[in-house]
Image: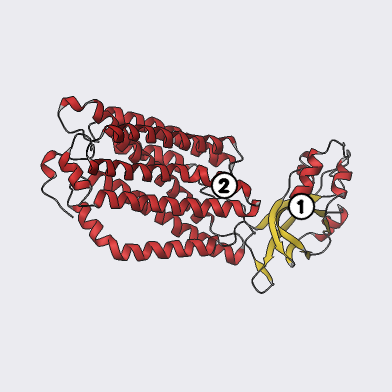
Amino acid sequence: MRWRLLWLLSAAAAGCCWGLAAGKTLRGGFASAATRREPWRPVAHFQFHGDHAVLCVRIKNVAVAVAKAARLHLFQAQEWQKLENSVQDHSCTEKFSKAQLTMTVNHTEQNLTVSQVPYPETWYVFYVDKFTCEENYSESEDIQFEMILLNPDAEGNPLDHFSAGESGLHEFFFLLVLAYFITACIYAQSLWQTIRKRGPMHGVLKVLTIALLLQAGSAFANYLHFSSYSRDGIGAPFMGSLAELCDIVSQIQMLYLLLSLCMGWTIGRMKKSHGRPLQWDSSPASTGIAVVVVATQSFLLIWEQFEDTNHHSYHSHHGLASGLLIGLRVCLALSLAAGLYQIITVERSTLKREFYITFAKACILWFLCHPCLATIAVIFREYQREKIITMGVILCQCISMVILYRLFLSHSLYWEVSSLSSVTLPLTISSGHKNRHHF
């Protein structure tokens, strides 16, 4: 029942991440009616850098574009925000007249060069025609278009589909997948043999390994998505969704694992007088607490997906759901640290204290890496923030998993602790196992 409920919550949260993300090659139609309703809504945004960035537009019905006096207006993000926040009341026409760059759409294919960008910055692209700021409007045909946004590559040629905020992620995920592959070649066989023994740590190793496999699957799917993205600016939306799905399920698995362990130890201390081993499977209280918190995180993850449909496991934190999710992780880290601190302060055995301290470090690193990196990223420029958060969180969580593996596979540490006291270690299957299996 416990596993069914956990997978149900995981599937509910992950299923909502299945959506399409906007690539840097955009296809659609410029609609005058939609532009009149929402003239301040950009059709695209991109972080240009260098001296030879290019916006390429291809249209099919040139005659319609000429008749409607179709144009594209480009604003730097900071300048657009100044206009939006200005106390002076600018008219629609006045606002668009202040664009840094303008392109008249009147050919089948046109290029606009964005040059002399001092540092990477977000640019907004707006579609405007003669009906956008006028009260009178007559029905007209949409202009079918394809828009390609390109940055200069290492040789200065405008061939790079990645915005400044995404550059380097492709190479990062390649190295991450390579590291997972090498690690699997070295340790997979011995880990599988350990799990097959079904010793006292069978439950925790099983959940930890599933979470690790999901993290590896997310990294591989991201690599495939970015590999395709580097060629066409669209990528593989299915792989992007799969990467986010794997990451969400892994986060839920790890949250349930760490909470169940901590709650089991805490309740084990409270019930120590009962004189029997406290098992993870037989603790309704620890399971109930873990399920409530996991359900809360699942709800926030679903909400976050609706707020930001781009394929990012770690979002920009501008929305309410993202802020609440970070707040939840901070509260979890503080509560688990407080619970483990109480156990550590009353523990007389040096060996068991060392075990709990190491576990506390892994928990705090897992939960606090995201909030801390999101806070640190604020001091950097906008285009650097996503990379800092994404790379930093993935690396920190990998380190946390390594700490947990070393802790629970250590013959000298965990097995001695298990022999000293099975009451405070909730994951033992039965007391008969603790002298029968060794790694």
**Circle 1: is it few (<14), some (14-19), or many (20+) Cα within 10 Å?**
some
**Residue located farthest toward the bottom when viewing the structure as drawn:** 155
In this view of the protein, which residue sits in the foreground, 63 or 385?
385
* The N terminus, quarter of image: top left
In this view of the protein, which residue sits in the foreground, 71 or 151?
151
Q: Secondary structure at mark 2?
A: helix
**Circle 2: is it few (<14), some (14-19), or many (20+) Cα within 10 Å?**
few
Can residue 160 be seen from the camera position used here? yes
> What amino acid is at disc 2?
Ile
In-image side of 200 versus 211 (left or right): left
The spot of residue 165 in percent (x, y) is 62, 56
Q: Nearer the viewer, mark 2 or mark 1?
A: 2
Position of 390 relative to 118 (above/below)? above
The spot of residue 37 in percent (x, y) is 77, 39
Residue found at x 38% / y 40%: 255
> What amino acid is at disc 1?
Gln
Tell whether label 1 touches label 2 (CB within 8 Å).
Answer: no
Position of 151 relative to 416 (above/below)? below
In-image side of 250 versus 113 (left or right): left
Position of 4 relative to 242 (above/below)? above
Tag 2 residue: 376
Mark 2 / mark 1, whichever is N-terminal: 1
* The C terminus, quarter of image: bottom left
The spot of residue 337 in percent (x, y) is 38, 36
The spot of residue 367 in percent (x, y) is 44, 42
In-image side of 406 versus 121 (left or right): left
Give the quadrant of residue 231.
bottom right
Q: Secondary structure at mark 1?
A: strand
Tag 1 residue: 76
Q: How many marks?
A: 2
